[in-house]
Image: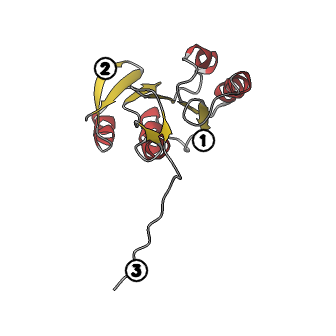
Amino acid sequence: MADLILVRCRSHRVKVTSPYKVRVVVDPTFGERLASLPAGEPVWVIDSSINTSVAHRLCRERNDQNHLTGITTFKPAANASPEEEVIRMLGTIEDHHGEYSADPPYSILELIGCAVSERLRSALAEFRFHVEACSADSVVAVRTP
């Protein structure tokens, strides 16, 4: 008979406002436009010389932010398309902003620098999101209750 070991990933969940939106920027030239996104809402932005320098400056200016309200940079994968970058980050974003980390968990996902595709729709559906709106370079997805 196997022993069961329970591991708790987080010591507690953090209270956040609802609806809780997370933005993911996969445009490596987004740069100064980061400053126009609302402070206090989490942003995951792809690492590039332009994006990272702006992200670091904003983090210094907004020093009261944390992992649920600030800017997080992530390294791009080699030769990955914007769609592939979003898909590969979905699990990590779920870990940081999902039900085990935030109360309530995030329910809106805004993807900037990425167009909608069937592959992206399918990946979002695995996390119970459906595409609500899209343009040539952005997607807004909402979690299905």
x 31%, y 20%: residue: 133
- Residue 119: x, y in percent? 31, 39
Q: What kind of element bears circle 2?
A: strand
Mark 1 or 2, closer to the camera: 2
Between the C-alphas of marks 3 and 1, the distance is 38 Å
Q: What kind of element bears circle 1?
A: loop
Mark 2 crowdedness (10 Å alpha carbons): few <14, some 14-19, many ≥20: few
Q: To which residue does mark 2 refer? A: 133
Q: To which residue does mark 3 refer? A: 3
Mark 2 or 3, closer to the camera: 3
Between the C-alphas of marks 1 and 2, the distance is 27 Å
x 46%, y 39%: residue: 102
At label 3, the amino acid type is Asp
At label 2, the amino acid type is Ala
Q: To which residue does mark 1 refer? A: 75
Between the C-alphas of marks 2 and 3, the distance is 47 Å
Residue 87 visible in the picture: yes
Is disc 2 in contact with disc 3, using a CB cutoff of under 8 Å? no
Mark 1 crowdedness (10 Å alpha carbons): few <14, some 14-19, many ≥20: few
